[in-house]
Image (tube, rainbow, N blue to C red):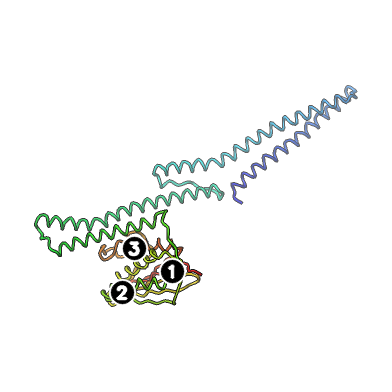
Amino acid sequence: MKRLYARIAIACIGIASGVLIIATITFLLETHYHLTMYRHQSQDLNMTSSSAFDMHFEQALIQSVLWTAILGIVLAIVISLFVAKRITAPLIHMKSVAERMAKGELTSRALVNGKDELADLGHSLNHLAEQLLLQQQLRKTMTADVAHELRTPLATLKSHMEAMIDGVWEPTPKRLESCFEEIERLRFLVGDLEQLTEVESPNFKLSFNEENIHSIVRHHIIANQAAFEKKGVKLLFQDQGQVQASIDKMRFGQIMVNLLSNALKFTPTGGRVTVAVTEKDHMVSISVSDTGIGIDHKELAFVFERFYRADKSRDRKSGGSGVGLTIVKKLVEAHGGIIEIQSQPGRGTEVEFQIPNSQ
């Protein structure tokens, strides 16, 4: 039983019990007092009339009721004030903390004592403050990252254009192609940001249908085969036959394209990328493993963060925008699945995601 509920219940029981105890004791004392007084008066004055007895009994009842009401009200006020103060004090404190948070003081925290519902509320308020502070830091980081990602290609374009405008460079096809590549990088970055914004939107929904996972994965492998052959990387496919699952075909395709693109990007010529489809405990497992450069184990916890790159020395041309795996994680979770990554520097990386099958 929660302590706040118990305190309020005990307070109510205490008030009711106190009033009953006061009423009983007061009635007994007043009755005893007036009966004793009646006996003394009867002996002293030789009273034999019942009217005297009725008068004393009536006085005993009236005084008992009055004293019970007075003492009961006093007891109820004292207990109520005590309980109200104990309950409202932490609420007033948390209200003050919430107001400071609303003004931007996200480092404010509520002081939490005990283990009752008010303590739970305090913990929740502190957790909310931590999440708001984290989101604020993420927004600042994302803004800085976007600015950094845009600055390099824009600076390159600006310098190229200025050189051609000033007549320092001739607008040769090679230099125009270089400008075109920078524009393409900007376009891909904007596209990645649009995808990320879309999958993180509260209104984002998937269109689920029963699909053959084997066929979809094979389709994307065939579609990417030429790019792998051009770089000299083997692309292998392993599966257990026909596997059905309820998925959004287009979004599932985005997952595969991002994972295959990452694997190709970080696998050197002569390497190998293996895609496997299996069933595990009512889940469909799809893994993409490569023999690429790998990732240090200290970096693995951050690879799904926006704009994170394990190799800080890589630019956007070789390292991508840094949001591909973030999009993949969001899409896998939207399918009700989970995603894991394992890697060893110099020995390759394996990304495995699981989604519920149709059984």
- Crowd class of label 1 (few under 14; some 14 to 19; many from 20; radius 10 Å): some
Q: What residue type is labelled 2?
A: Gln
Q: Position of residue 159 (x, y in %)?
A: 16, 56
Q: Nearer the viewer, residue 326 or 138?
A: 326
Report the Cα–Cα distance between label 1 and label 3: 24 Å
Q: Which of 239 and 322 is in front in this view?
A: 239
On the rendered structure, is 298 left or right of 28? Answer: left
- Which residue is identified by label 3? 324
Q: Say what secondary structure mark 1 lies in.
A: strand
Q: Which of marks 2 and 1 is in front?
A: 1
Q: What residue type is labelled 3?
A: Gly
Q: Which label's residue is closer to the chain start, 2 or 3?
A: 2
- Residue 225 image label: 2
Q: Position of residue 45 (x, y in %)?
A: 88, 22
Q: Residue reaching furthest left? A: 167
Q: Is residue 276 above or below residue 166?
A: below
Q: In this view, does 34 lie above or below 238?
A: above
Q: In this view, does 37 lie above or below 272?
A: above
Report the Cα–Cα distance between label 2 and label 1: 22 Å
On the rendered structure, is 110 left or right of 218? Answer: right
Quadrant in the rendering for residue 70? top right
Report the Cα–Cα distance between label 2 and label 3: 20 Å
Q: Which label's residue is closer to the chain start, 1 or 3?
A: 1
Q: Say what secondary structure mark 2 lies in.
A: helix
Q: Which of 87 and 282 is in front in this view?
A: 282
Looking at the rendered structure, the number of numbered marks drawn on it comes to: 3
Q: Position of residue 41 (x, y in %)?
A: 86, 24
Q: Where is residue 215 in the image (x, y as percent from the top left)?
A: 40, 73
- Which residue is identified by label 1? 211
Q: Marks 2 and 1: CB-CB under 8 Å?
A: no
Q: What residue type is labelled 1?
A: Glu
Q: Say what secondary structure mark 3 lies in.
A: helix
